[in-house]
Image (cartoon, coloured by chain):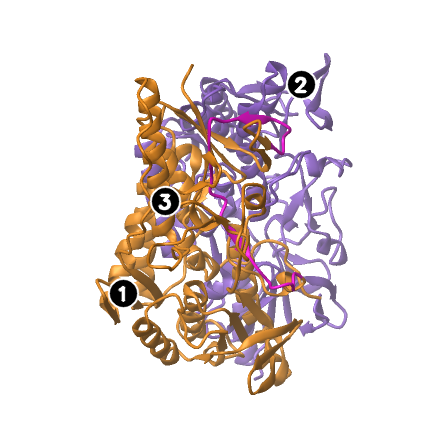
Chain colours: A purple, B orange
């Protein structure tokens, strides 16, 4: 087989889109991921808040690529890339040689030099982390129910969410809402409605990446749900049961048993071996999304630092990643076809992010949308949000199941996946 | 409040049934479990084989008892029972004092003195164990796909199930079936249909607790699915990648990368502090299910050793546990009412197990049933099995979701929950 070999690292939105778009291209595709599943990250907070099961928002990559004859799925972790020899090294010791390399390994949390916080304040990037948050969230109420000291009980029922981007807003809103609805009927000694949810944000508004109109709407909706919002505030210390918050005016200490991290991203370390990186470790790519000086290496998704003509970076959300995946696939396809017919490769197009709107949800029938230059909130924004997210869930089965779970929760005010699993004891 | 306090340890079929049956009784009920959920154990093998999600077969105990005003749910592990002082000690250091105690903590696996096997040959009692089996099952195919040595590849695709009771039969049948159907379309280098599933049983037939007619039917159906059945055979050594099987004729060594344990039970250690136990640690109870000399202590479910008038023990399956839960609740209720109205307690009835039939499933539309003295197999037995299991799934929501998942799998030959989660590396 003389077809060029395209190795794609990372089965997220960018990598998987790129692989699927190459289905009819005269290339061989290998998609490498250390997980066997593609994760629909925008709904991961729903697993963390006990609404959905992991299988509802994840699809085995093998299954997604099943019908695609020119693609193979490889389960493994990439430990290095040798751009001179054009090989990818796997943790199994195997090497994959490539003609074209697509790197889309995404980002993880950044604790700004406080990596010791990661244990106390878990983030939300993987299924395992979502299940950790779910376990801690549900256990907090169980512990409060057994607690006799009012101060300790209050501490158990105080949740601090650091970072008011889409994930932080969704987590805080949903937690406030379900403690006031679903859980309040289930306990005898405590009143879950007295749960305190504090959302901490260093910027001067929530949803900083969204237009200001959306931020205002989200702020009001969070307030209605009882979420305390602290703007221009930083978490400067996280200890067991205690969070220190710092503003320009001074320092406040909150007694809080539960801290969740939704702030800051750091790019996957693979980026450093590919080219020049920005402060968060994103690889600066050319406008065709390839690495300067390495025409055969593309970097996509959250790992890529793409400057748009209007100056701003591409927002680190699914639409940008999907568009980048399509763009790289188009270039690879054109060049492979040109090569096959002995023609010169056509010039490469520049990537342009097309902003089709932004959406963030806050709770049952609460959301904000910014589409076609207009910001609005309320039920219609929530319905649009639900439709868009169900539509983009990969795999028809998942769509049906998630829709059913949502209708169920909507009608019966119920949560399906309220299981505490994993190590039972994490704290004394 | 002067009402007697009934403490129930264990939220399985026996304990939960007992708690719910006491809803209108003049008693206070506390149900203690170290898990927050009741697990529908008969379907746990479906989680292990990637058909259902944990939340489909588990219901939060708090939710189940939500409407029951006289019952409270306590999340905690019981570390001891002081039958003199009538208190239950929890791991949190708290004590619960009781007037009546119901112990239904069930059984765990027995490795017959080879506890070191538990790591290599996981059993199937909890959600965590089911997810471990699911991960190993799916990872075996991933490893085989990357393997170039034919011998090693064959070893990865060899599964040995030790024990041919209902769980072993269900696991072996389902694994054989899905490797021949669902998975075979997804791999490029290996043919999952070449998977070898070996079912090992020390007795002279599969489903030893069932009537011989059922065993014959199940044997034939397993054979059709390609399961190799070794009767009168014991696993005498389990090492990484190798299992030693011993019969009267000699010893055979199987190269097998995956071993699952479905043999042998040992009762929960709490039993020893309550009364005289049998060889597997079950507490010998009187015919009213109370402990000899301790009228206020009942032992129910798998932990109880009940001799029936016909000589046989009660089979360790859900129907027996449920019937025991009802029986104990009836006695407790009658005595509480008598006490309230100042009457003498009525004499206690003896527990009689009513065998309504036995069911075991082997795969998609394959099952065996023994009802009203008749054994039969095939589609009608499978439909009966599916109906009965869906009907008994606690919580209406779970019933609907499980039914939908099954219809989906049946129509599309698909598995919903094919996720590899948890620690990614367990072996080198």
> Per the image, is B19 magenta?
no
Q: Nearer the viewer, mark 1 or mark 2?
A: 1
- Disc ID at residue A73: none
The extreme top residue here reads: A249
Image height check: is B133 above or below B93?
below
Give the residue displayed 70% in from the left and 25% down from the top.
A235
Element under disc 1:
strand
- In this picture, residue B332 sits left or right of residue A136: left
Check disc 3 and report the residue beneath it: B324
Whole-percent x and y of residue A140? 57, 29
Q: Nearer the viewer, residue A172 or A53?
A: A53
Q: Nearer the viewer, residue B251 or B315?
A: B315
Whichever of labels 3 and 1 marks the residue nearer the N terminus, that label is 3
The verdict on a common chain for dots 3 and 1 is yes
> Per the image, is B111 magenta?
yes
Disc 1 to disc 2, how far (Cα)?
A: 62 Å
Whole-percent x and y of residue A111? 72, 36
Q: Quadrant of residue B94?
A: top right
The extreme bottom residue here reads: B249
Looking at the image, how many numbered discs can be counted on the residues?
Answer: 3
Disc 3 to disc 2, how far (Cα)?
A: 50 Å
Element under disc 2:
strand
Q: Mark 2 packing: few (<14 Cα in 10 Å), some, or many (20+)? A: some
Image height check: is B355 above or below A387?
below
Q: Say whether marks 1 and 2 touch (CB < 8 Å).
A: no
Check disc 1 and report the residue beneath it: B370
Please provide the residue range marked out in magenta: B90-115
Q: Nearer the viewer, mark 3 or mark 1?
A: 3
In the picture, which quadrant includes the N terminus of chain B?
Answer: top left
Using the image, name the chain to which the residue with label 1 belongs: B
Q: Nearer the viewer, mark 3 or mark 2?
A: 3
- Disc ID at residue A254: 2
């Amino acid at each position: 087989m003389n077809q060029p070999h395209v190795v794609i690292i990372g089965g997220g939105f960018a990598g998987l889109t790129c692989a699927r778009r190459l289905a009819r291209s005269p290339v061989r595709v290998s998609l490498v991921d250390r997980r066997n599943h593609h994760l629909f990250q925008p709904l991961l907070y729903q697993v963390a808040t006990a609404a959905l099961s992991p299988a509802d928002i994840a699809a085995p990559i093998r299954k997604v690529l099943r019908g695609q004859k020119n693609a193979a799925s490889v389960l493994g972790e990439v430990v290095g890339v040798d751009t001179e020899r054009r090989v990818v090294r796997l943790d199994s010791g195997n090497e994959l040689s490539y003609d074209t390399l697509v790197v889309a390994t995404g980002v993880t949390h950044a604790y700004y030099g406080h990596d010791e916080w990661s244990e106390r304040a878990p983030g939300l990037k993987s299924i395992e982390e979502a299940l950790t948050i779910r376990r801690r969230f549900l256990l907090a109420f169980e512990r409060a129910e057994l607690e006799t000291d009012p101060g300790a009980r209050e501490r158990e029922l105080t949740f601090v969410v650091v970072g008011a981007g889409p994930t932080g807003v969704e987590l805080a809103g949903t937690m406030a809402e379900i403690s006031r609805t679903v859980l309040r009927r289930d306990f005898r000694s405590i009143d879950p409605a007295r749960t305190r949810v504090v959302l901490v944000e260093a910027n001067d508004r929530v949803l900083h990446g969204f237009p200001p109109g959306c931020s205002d709407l989200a702020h009001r909706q969070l307030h209605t749900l009882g979420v305390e919002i602290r703007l221009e505030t930083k978490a400067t210390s996280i200890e067991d049961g205690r969070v220190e918050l710092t503003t320009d005016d001074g320092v406040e200490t909150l007694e809080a048993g539960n801290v969740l991290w939704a702030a800051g991203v750091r790019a996957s370390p693979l980026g450093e071996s590919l080219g020049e990186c920005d402060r968060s470790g994103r690889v600066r790519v050319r406008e065709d999304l390839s690495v300067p000086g390495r025409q055969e290496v593309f970097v996509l998704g959250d790992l890529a630092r793409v400057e748009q003509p209007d100056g701003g970076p591409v927002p680190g959300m699914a639409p940008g990643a999907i568009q980048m995946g399509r763009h790289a696939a188009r270039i690879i396809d054109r060049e492979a076809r040109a090569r096959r017919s002995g023609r010169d490769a056509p010039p490469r197009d520049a990537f342009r992010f097309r902003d089709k709107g932004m959406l963030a949800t806050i709770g049952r029938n609460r959301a904000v949308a910014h589409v076609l230059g207009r910001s609005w909130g309320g039920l219609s924004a929530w319905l649009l949000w639900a439709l868009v997210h169900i539509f983009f869930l990969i795999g028809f089965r998942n769509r049906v199941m998630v829709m059913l779970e949502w209708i169920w929760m909507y009608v019966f005010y119920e949560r399906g996946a309220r299981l505490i699993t994993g190590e039972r004891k994490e704290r004394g």
